[in-house]
Amino acid sequence: QVQLVEYGGGLVQAGGSLKLSCVVSGRTFSSYAMGWFRQAPGKERDLVASISARGGTTSYADSVLGRFTISRDNVKNTLYLQMNSLKPEDTAVYSCAARGVGALEYRYWGQGTQVTVSS
């Protein structure tokens, strides 16, 4: 079993920054591709950013490209999301998720952390 716990959410003013962390335990972290998702009230959950198992490949949603950076530390078993130039529309519950290499879907999920950006 894999456990994921997110940290770092909170309230920030527009234009500010936050850094989310996701600590993973239970299996070999470096064997999983990872992603950050977000879900705003009344909206579907969207993939914000993803990173390959060894960190060599990243991808971003167009809405966050150039503002958010996903990274991972396979020694600390931790996934990060650095969020800069935050906008009110970034307000959502952010969740991390793990996907086995070659798998099509994310299998393991964290409980989520609230990010609120005030205007």
Image (cartoon, rainbow, N blue to C red):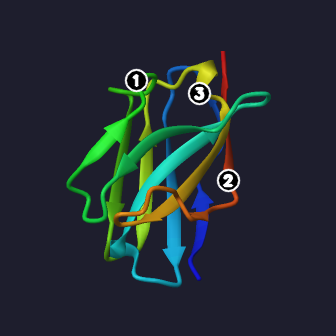
Q: Is residue 54 above or below residue 27?
A: above
Q: Is residue 14 above or below residue 17?
A: above
Q: Amino acid at mark 3?
A: Asp
User: Residue 51 appears at what percent x and percent y?
Assistant: 34, 52
Q: Relative to residue 58, is residue 110 drawn left or right?
A: right
At horizontal 31% and vertical 64% (from top left) the residue drawn is 53
Residue on which disc 1 sits: 62
Q: CA distance from mark 1 to mark 3?
A: 13 Å
At horizontal 60% and vertical 58% (from top left) the residue drawn is 7
Quarter holding the N terminus is: bottom right
Q: Amino acid at mark 1?
A: Asp
Name the mark nearer the viewer: 1 or 3.
1
First of labels 2, 3 by sequence position: 3
Q: Is residue 67 above or below residue 28?
A: above
Residue on which disc 2 sits: 112
Residue on which disc 3 sits: 90
At horizontal 50% and vertical 48% (from top left) the residue drawn is 36
Quarter holding the C terminus is: top right
User: Residue 58 appears at what percent x and percent y?
Assistant: 29, 45
Q: CA distance from mark 2 to mark 1?
A: 22 Å
Name the mark nearer the viewer: 2 or 1.
1
Q: CA distance from mark 2 to mark 3?
A: 14 Å
Outermost residue on the left side: it is 56
Say if mark 2 contacts mark 3, CB within 8 Å. no
